[in-house]
Image: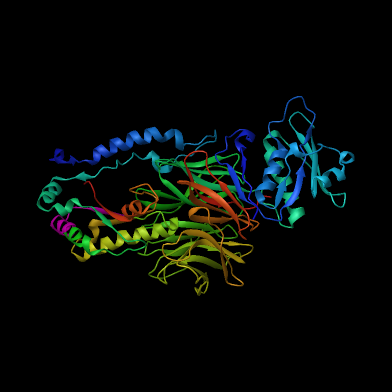
Amino acid sequence: MMRVYFWLCLMLLSVSARAELTIEITQGIASSIPISVVPMKWSGAKALPVNLGDIVRSDLERSGHFSVLKPDDMLSHPSQEEDVYFRDWRLLKQEYVVIGEVKLTSADKYQFRYQLFDVFNEREILTQTLTGKVSQFRDIAHRVSDAIYEQLTGIRGAFSTKIAYVTTNSLRTRFNLAIADSDGAREKVVMSSKYSIFSPAWSPDGKRLAYVLLEDTGSKVYVQDLSTGKKQLVSANKGINSAPAFSPDGNKLALVLSKDGNPEIYVVDLATRHWLRVTNHYAIDTEPNWMPDGKHIIFTSGRAGKPQIYRVNIESGYIERLTFEGNYNARARLAQDGRFLVMVHQSAKGEPFHIASMDLTRGLLQILTSDTFLDESPSVSPNGVMVMYAAKYNKRSILAAVSVDGDVKFLVPSKSGDVREPAWGPYLN
Amino acid sequence: MQLNKLFAVSLLSVAIMGCASGGGTEEGTSSTETVVEESQTQAVPESPDVDVVTEEQVQAQAENPLLKQTLVYFGYDRAEIRPEFKDVLNAHAEYLVANPQARIVLEGHCDERGTVEYNLALGERRANIVKRYLIVQGANPRQLESVSFGEERPAMVGSNDSSWAKNRRTEIKYQAR
């Protein structure tokens, strides 16, 4: 397995907000695709505040599917097709080359044109022109990464998506719910509290976040509109109010209430406030997550003595156990249209907690992580490729990511304090 | 008679926590100019994290030192009361029976292992098992509230067996009247 250690200082690239997270790639795939992203031509007098090429390079590198040539190792930095000498790129063992140019088109608008070449066949296979203001440069760069990634892997890119997470100071006296770009840049704190915030969950349109606030009187569930910042109390019943999850259509919330004495899964219609109790068992039932069909919910239950993953049909109440391997399986999420379960897994009592995936069609369980400690809160990218999770690493709480096949790994530590509870947002375009 | 309310050792701990949180602010708050919406509950005057000990309790504690023990510990992923805590809980139950006006909040906690949500549920079980035990021993259900803090409010920081053992607990908290 190829191991690359690669530090990216995203803070230097950030426009208005200091990025709280950094990224350290620890493992990429052995057969990664060699690609060169030539520094973009810019003829302006002043340097551009955001380096588009750097962002595209770090996106592709972080995906684990590409080995990206450093600009210093290139023989030339062409920006026009006629200046691309394919022999030179073949000499550098490059399979693909990206060139491009940024131009100012009006007072504050820029035009960005790029071309992707197949070096072996000596032909252009993708070209796009995007326009935007300086404040949109990061969005443009991630769009370019998405398009290149999809062109070369056949899988939709998820670089343009957002992540939500919770940061805490070491004394745990302040909790910030933040959202950031998928590379950790442009962090925005959307909610700050002296109380613990956890289980953030995105609405399918990416416009709202549900989360739990653990106040002195107990846990409560809120839904916050990200554009207005307004938060709405959804559930403050006696006992536990927790583990919110939006339905695929965004109209309902699955959550956990213990108002009748025991944690059970409920579904609430957010418009009508009609409540439906889904489970009824004296054991712990928690961590609901919707199947893509909107008719089934997977959840964690202690009904067999130890937590395992189950699936319930909301209408019929029919319950089926999904996991049998291991001492502790909890907090399952789905990847690739429900084909894979991704969850917290402990193989046997006393063994470490890691992230595992299970192919539901074949029943095969694979432990994905090994270098981190107390792995929890897995969240899957919308293209079903990567899992972001929280873990302990060098005595700190950090975020880390691993591909659903276990081949790609990177760490996302916070610059200061602890970071937990990642939630990967949906596609926004 | 109101003056008889004694603020015990915990006042000191509040003072210490105050200093500590003051020192920690530079680390926790983040960095951006974006509007930070404060937690709704912050508008409400903060209830100080102080155990108010009544005169009756002080007397009762002098008569039965077991009442000073307000922590019940649990095994890993367990929510059963261990035999060694039964005398302590019996003493609290007797006190509740003798003092019908006394109120208790039972706070259930977990260690950091396992998932946040499963631990929130487990913490509730730890609070409720103590609640049920006290009711069986004669306490009135109206005297007892339970709340789970899951793994969110550890008594000891540190990812090791000794910290974890101290964090798997139910705290018995007498309420001010």
- Looking at the rendering, the stretch of residues picked out in magenta corresponds to B91-108
**Residue B115 left/right relative to B161:** right
Query: Residue at horizontal 86%, vertical 38%?
Result: A80
**Displayed quadrant of residue A50:** top right
Task: Give how far across and how far down residue A23 sits, in percent.
Answer: 59, 44
Q: Is residue B150 above or below residue A134?
A: below
Task: Tell me, yes or no, whether the highlighted magenta stretch contains residue A88.
Answer: no
Q: How many marks?
A: 0
Q: Is residue B37 above or below residue A95?
A: above
**Displayed quadrant of residue B51:** top left
Query: Residue at horizontal 70%, vertical 38%?
Result: A137
Q: Is residue A272 visible?
A: no
**Residue A146 left/right relative to B174:** right
Q: Foreground residue, A58 or B87?
A: A58
Task: Give how far across and how far down residue A65 sits, in percent.
Answer: 69, 53
Task: Give how far across and how far down residue B26 sits, in percent.
Answer: 45, 33
Q: Is residue A411 above or below residue A74?
A: below
Query: Residue at horizontal 36%, vertical 40%?
Result: B44
Q: Is residue A375 visible?
A: yes
